[in-house]
Image: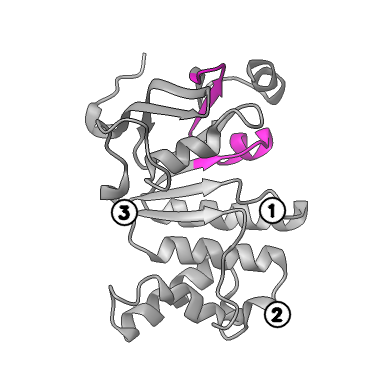
Amino acid sequence: METINKEDLISINNINKKFNEKVVFKNFNIDFYKNKVNCIIGKSGCGKSTLLNIISGIIPNDNENFETIEKYGVSYIFQEDRLVDWLTVGENITLVVKKLYNKKMSDELCEKYLDLVGIKEYKNYYPQMLSGGLRQRVNIARAFIYPSKIVIMDEPFKSIDVINKEIIMNNFKKILEREERTVLFVTHDIDEALLLSDKIYVLGNSPINIKKIIDKKDNIGKIDIYKLI
């Protein structure tokens, strides 16, 4: 059996959320593994994105006895890239570190992450000149240039075609091979979960609970996970 130290976990306790009369979370606790890709899956509408929004502080928890993950520093990669259209690719990426680094350092880091996501030649392009796949690679570079401990990904590959998705996920894995980040990743795509994740959390029921935690080393396939969901 795997021995787990508390120092290796980010523990989120006492999550409670109700929308009108629907109780989504009731005294819900979850432990994420530091410096791993923690994937959250479950039926559509079960509350996966709500969980990310609560623990990151985007929406409030219903009770005050609760601590978000904001103290770790958080970067976001959403389905929508949310790039600023009147800034170049390079300017979009360095915008999030403008107050942290001088221009020389910002430019050096920008070059590093552009290279890691394979779009160095697009540094001076504007977002509207890029395809959806390229824009999402800019989005990933922007998330990683910020010195956060946690990267939140909410279905970031949903609107990307299969070929570009494979390229982007390989770029993403390349960055994680070089850097220690804790990733919280929501997806509906079991293939994405199996490819990228170290741990897969299957959520379900109402109020939500954790039905199973699957380790990358477990001998479990796509069909078995669908049965759990």
**Foreground of the two, 65 or 228:** 65
Q: Do the CB atoms of the residues marked 1 and 2 lie less than 8 Å apart? A: no
Q: Residue 191 location, x and y as percent? A: 68, 36
Q: Is residue 179 visible?
A: yes
- Of marks 1 and 3, the one in the foreground: 3
Q: Is residue 14 above or below residue 34?
A: above
Secondary element at tag 3: loop
- Give me the residue at 72% from left, 21% from top: 223
Q: Residue 26 location, x and y as percent? A: 41, 20
- Give me the residue at 31% from left, 53% from top: 73
The answer to whether residue 91 is left or right of residue 35 is right
Query: Which quarter shows the C terminus?
Result: top right
Q: Do the CB atoms of the residues marked 3 and 2 lie less than 8 Å apart? A: no
Instruction: Report which residue position mark 1 lands on.
Output: 165
Residue 187 in the magenta stretch? The answer is yes
Residue projecting furthest to the front: 20
Mark 1 or 2 closer to N-term? 2
- Of marks 1 and 2, the one in the foreground: 2
Q: Residues within 10 Å of mark 2 (few under 14, many from 20)?
A: few
Instruction: Report which residue position mark 2 lands on.
Output: 129
The kind of residue on which mark 1 rests is: Lys
Instruction: Report which residue position mark 3 lands on.
Output: 73
Q: Do the CB atoms of the residues marked 1 and 3 lie less than 8 Å apart? A: no
What is the distance, in whole Å, between disc 3 and disc 2 at their CAs?
Answer: 31 Å
Secondary element at tag 2: helix
The kind of residue on which mark 2 rests is: Met
Q: Residues within 10 Å of mark 1 (few under 14, many from 20)?
A: some
Q: Residue 55 location, x and y as percent? A: 38, 39
Q: Residues within 10 Å of mark 3 (few under 14, many from 20)?
A: few
